[in-house]
Image (tube, grey):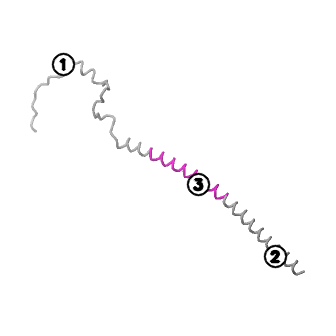
Amino acid sequence: MNSKGGSTVGASAAELKNRKLRDTIKQLNTTIDTLNSLISTLQTTISEQNTREQNYKEQIDYLTKKLFGRSSEKKVGDIPGQMSLFNEAEMTVDQRQMTVPVKAHTRKKR
């Protein structure tokens, strides 16, 4: 009876140990699945944040150039191959006609 009882007790102890190991494996697999989904969610969030950050940088660059950049009224020079719309009238008018004689005068002293 001892040998049967001992083997039965030994088998049930081994069986209990196997059940505990299976339960532990299931819990670990569940934890791994949960962590993988969390990692995926965080990667998506990081990607969205990076995109948003890039958009903000582009907006800052644009606004900085708009605020501190060159004004469109300042003329750096003619672009080669680009026709000028405003010089056409000046080129057709004789330079002598553009000068207006002014009478000479002197200022009064105070």
From the image, give the main secondary structure of the stretch colored magenta: helix
Q: Quadrant of residue 9?
A: bottom right
> Quadrant where the N terminus lies?
bottom right
Q: Is residue 14 magenta?
A: no
Q: Which residues are magenta?
A: 33-58
Q: The residue under label 1 is which amino acid type?
A: Gln
* Callout 2 secondary element: helix
Dot label at residue 97: 1
Kindly identify which residue carries mark 3.
Answer: 42
| Residue 103 in the image, given as x and y percentages of width and height | 12, 25
Q: Which residue is mark 2?
A: 10
Gap in angstroms between the C-alphas marked 3 and 2: 47 Å
Specify the amino acid type for callout 2.
Answer: Gly
The outermost residue toward the front is 3
Depth check: 39 or 51 in front? Answer: 39
- Badge 3 crowding class, 10 Å Cα cut-off, few under 14, some 14 to 19, many 20 or more, is few
Q: Nearer the viewer, residue 109 or 99?
A: 99
Q: Answer yes or no: do the residues labelled 3 and 2 have beta carbons within 8 Å?
A: no
Please name the residue shown 34% across and 41% down the image. 69
In the figure, is residue 110 to the left or right of 93? Answer: left
Picture coordinates of residue 80, whole percent (x, y) = 30, 28
In the image, is 71 to the left or to the right of 62? Answer: left
Position of residue 48 relative to residue 80, above or below, is below
Q: Secondary structure at mark 1?
A: helix
Q: Quadrant of residue 90?
A: top left
- Which is more N-terminal, label 1 or label 3? 3
